[in-house]
Image (tube, coloured by chain):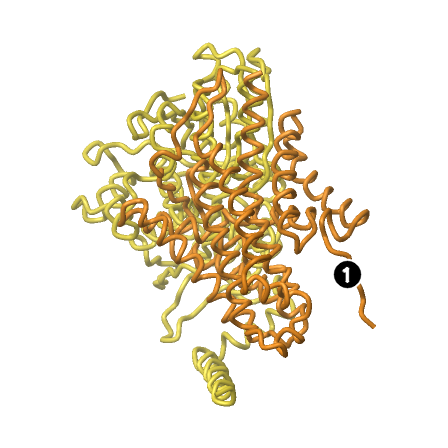
Amino acid sequence: MSTFLQYVFTGISVGGCYALIAIGYTLVYGILRLINFAHGDIFMMAGYFMIFSFAVFPFPVAIIITLVATTALGILIEKFAYSPLRQAPRMSVMISAIGVSYLLQNLSTYLFSGLPQPYPAIPGLKQRVMLGDASVSLVTFITPIVTIIIVLLLLRLVNKTKIGMAMRAVSKDYEAASLMGIKLNTTISFTFAVGSLLAAVGSILYFTDRSSVYPFSGALPGLKCFVAAVFGGIGSIPGALLGGFFIGISETIIKAVGLSTFSDAFTFIILIIMLIVKPTGLFGEKSVDKV
Amino acid sequence: MKKFLSIVLSLLMVFSIVSCAKKSTGEVANADSAAANVEKEATEVAQVNTADDGEKIIKIGVFEPQSGQNGGGGKQEVYGIRYANMIYNTITIGGEEYKIVLDEVDNQSNDTEAVSAAQKLVADRVNVVLGSYGSSVSIKAGPHFRKAEIPAIGCSCTNVQVTKGNDYYFRVCYLDPFQGRIMAQYAKKHNYNKVAVITELGDDYSTGLGKSFEDGCKELGIEVVSHHEFQKNEQDFNSILTKIKSANPEFIFAPSSIVTAPLILTQARALNINCQIGAGDTWENGTIITNAGDAANGIVVSTFYEAKSKEEAEGEEAVFLNGVNGDGNGFLEYLKSQDPKEEMIPAVSALGYDSYLAAYKAIEKAGSLEGPAIRDALAELSFTGVTGDISFNSDGDAIKNTAYIKEVSEGQFVFKEKV
């Protein structure tokens, strides 16, 4: 029983972090039709920001610095690597994104060495609670709650505010949107800012329980969250939430039945099946070709 | 603005081409022909390199990961090699003095990059290759060195496949079957009857060592209750560990990289898995203690080298620990000057030093820079290095029968037993 509980908690906490990252993919895709391959590495950089700011400042300040720095990084990447390619074919932007991903990985190897760095323990988050025989850290409970609150806020932002309306307009047709007086660059920058901010929150929750950061920390979560986003229907925020939890929990189940060797294979089989059966994902919009 | 930028860029390009050509016209020509047939080229041309000022040089290729998953460990090995190069920087062959220059390439801990890094060394016409940290990359690069008849000396690659069937690959460390058996004996000695194994999928070192440990356990009648594999770059071990916990082992053997070690350790301890955890040589690394903190206490590792105190050290080890002048300014001081975070001498640095020494002695003995001659000299070589007596068997493996078991206690690797 306690083993089962342990699996449930593991699945939910991993799923929550995946959901936060997957939303970043989905937001950017919704606006730019771009799969931002550097997203996983922004997540990793957020880990490093936390390590360095925590060494100097008390933790509330360090958290704020991490959030701000990661957001700034996201905006900067958009400005330098994607916005000059706005008129270029979509493929060029994607290649640029892959380039940024490699740049971040190698830059952090160069700057912070390939050795893992210990992630600071944020007071309170890491405290362990015993439920029967299952030992669970507080962050495990906080993760899904934070994730759901953020998704609700985000849905409000997209559906109720002016900038949200601008985002939706750009995502429908960005040429028409800019003709209607929507500032394209501001809207896109804002989207990247939100996406990166979520990656930063996800990174704090994720690394608190996993204790160390190295330059390739973002690679695997990045890939899996991309699958999660596609699964839920890329472009859809509730879809990304559901996809994240689904991938996180099913991965845990696969390992629980003793098939740990195949856990990643399984994740990608889901991707392939989803693309064959329902290419738009669970909540994806049907694309209508305009004539 | 755009025009200006493109002018600047094109100027930069022109400048870089010019400066390349200026460096050495010989090198450019060499690179061209190398592209045509890298490996053949190298064997046909006499392997003597000359520097710009006419000084004769010997190139020793350093084939190590300096980035990627094993970047940290590879770097420590490189420091050992660089330090050896500082001490032994010239060699006399046939009455002529040669300067020894290191040619470092980064294999990025990646099997594909390893091949291109190896090809670069072949194209650079190095006389000997040292490395690598990590068996996988060495296995992939081996055939390229053999084809070009460049002898290679592995520092800490312990997988059997590295030297097997490759008469140009040697190594100064012991092998995984030996190491795995040592750890199985350790488990037996401490009355562990149920063990669990965690290995990394697709990593030759991890799976190879895990398998030899399991084989050793079977021979000794220890039950392996659970075996799990995880993916490269995995960070969440909670599910695997929960599964292992339910099997209730008395010892967990988890040979893996130093990146995964702290993750496994902290997560295992957080799940209240309190049995002893052990691994192979890679885990003997200070970063694990820095990262895992208290969770690292009590782990056991098998390792290549146990540093004596500076006063007790003799022969080559004394040079290694105290510096060439014996003034106490030895490797640890050098290491700290390069990376202030280092607190102890990593075993792999000592092996890096020994591999350089093996190459040095072999070239000296061969009295030639030809690959086959150095190879023959290596096969017959016997000397005392920092990590003990070194000579090679017919496979090219160092004949070693000592391993050290260390245990972490209060944030330090402490010598536990010699096997």
The yellow-coloured chain is labelled: B
> In screen coordinates, is B180 left or right of A67?
right
Pinpoint residue A59: horizontal percent, then vertical percent. 31, 44
Looking at the image, the residue that sits furthest to the front is A160
Circle 1: is it few (<14), some (14-19), or many (20+) Cα within 10 Å? few
Instruction: Give the residue drawn at x 52%, y 61%.
Output: A192
Instruction: Give the residue drawn at x 51%, y 43%.
Output: A149
* Colour of chain A as rendered: orange
Dividing the picture into quarters, in which one does residue B52 lie?
bottom left
> In screen coordinates, is A17 left or right of A289?
left
- Residue that badge 1 annotates: A287
Placement of B199 over or under B42, stated as above or below: above
Chain at numbered mark 1: A
The number of numbered discs placed on residues in the rendered structure image is 1
Whether residue B213 appears in this view of the structure is no
Placement of A174 over or under B59, stated as above or below: below
On-image quarter of the C terminus of chain A: bottom right
Secondary element under disc 1, as helix, strand or loop, is: loop
Which is more toward the observer, B1 or A196?
A196
Placement of A6 over or under A174, stated as above or below: above
Instruction: Give the residue drawn at x 45%, y 59%.
Output: A71
Placement of A132 over or under A245, stated as above or below: above
Whether residue B182 appears in this view of the structure is yes
